[in-house]
Image (tube, rainbow, N blue to C red):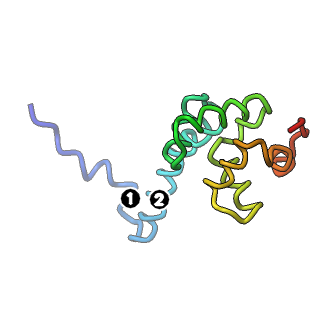
């Protein structure tokens, strides 16, 4: 059974809009759809997701697990593993991969906590 053609009826509220207004309306609606997803991504994460992010950034699985484990131990993971390492790299003015390697050597955890305004735990 063919679908009834109700296009004209469904577009009635858009008929008087200019191309620019339709464009703006599209992005307004798209943002309404994406905003809850972004919020969920900020709130709900797992160590597996964070390790996966580090793998996509170029870290090995051998490096990703201890980095994420240390972030959990220091209560920093809620900021996102990739974000933490990237910000530390910016702070030190080095590549984020180098920043991650330095974290693995035990360097920079205090600075990382300070960057994110968290209580400093021992290195």
Label 1 crowd (10 A; few <14 / some 14-19 / many >=20): few
Residue 14 in the image: state x and y as whole percent: 38, 58
Question: Which corner quadrant of the image does residue 42 belong to?
Answer: top right
Q: Looking at the image, which residue is at 68% across and 30% down?
A: 69
Cα separation between marks 1 and 2: 9 Å
Q: Looking at the image, which residue is at 23% across and 45% down?
A: 6
* Side (left or right) of 11 relative to 91: left
In front of the other: 7 or 33: 33
Residue 108 in the image: state x and y as whole percent: 80, 48
Which type of secondary structure does the marked residue at label 2 adopt? helix
Residue wearing tag 2: 25
Residue wearing tag 1: 14
Mark 2 and mark 1 in contact (Cβ < 8 Å)?
Answer: yes
Earlier sequence position, callout 1 versus callout 2 = 1
* Side (left or right) of 20 relative to 82: left
* Side (left or right) of 57 relative to 19: right
In front of the other: 89 or 45: 89
Q: Is 31 placed above or below 18 here?
A: above
């Amino acid at each position: 059974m063919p679908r009834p053609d109700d296009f004209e009826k469904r577009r009635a509220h858009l008929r008087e809009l200019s191309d620019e207004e339709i464009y703006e309306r599209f992005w307004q609606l798209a943002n309404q759809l994406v905003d809850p997803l972004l919020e969920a991504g900020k709130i709900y994460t797992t160590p597996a997701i964070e390790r996966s992010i580090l793998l996509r950034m170029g870290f090995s699985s051998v490096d990703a697990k201890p980095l994420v484990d240390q972030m959990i131990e220091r209560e920093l993971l809620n900021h996102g593993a990739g974000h933490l390492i990237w910000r530390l790299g910016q702070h030190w003015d080095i590549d984020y991969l180098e920043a991650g390697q330095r974290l693995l050597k035990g360097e920079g955890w205090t600075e990382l906590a300070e960057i994110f305004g968290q209580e400093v735990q021992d290195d």
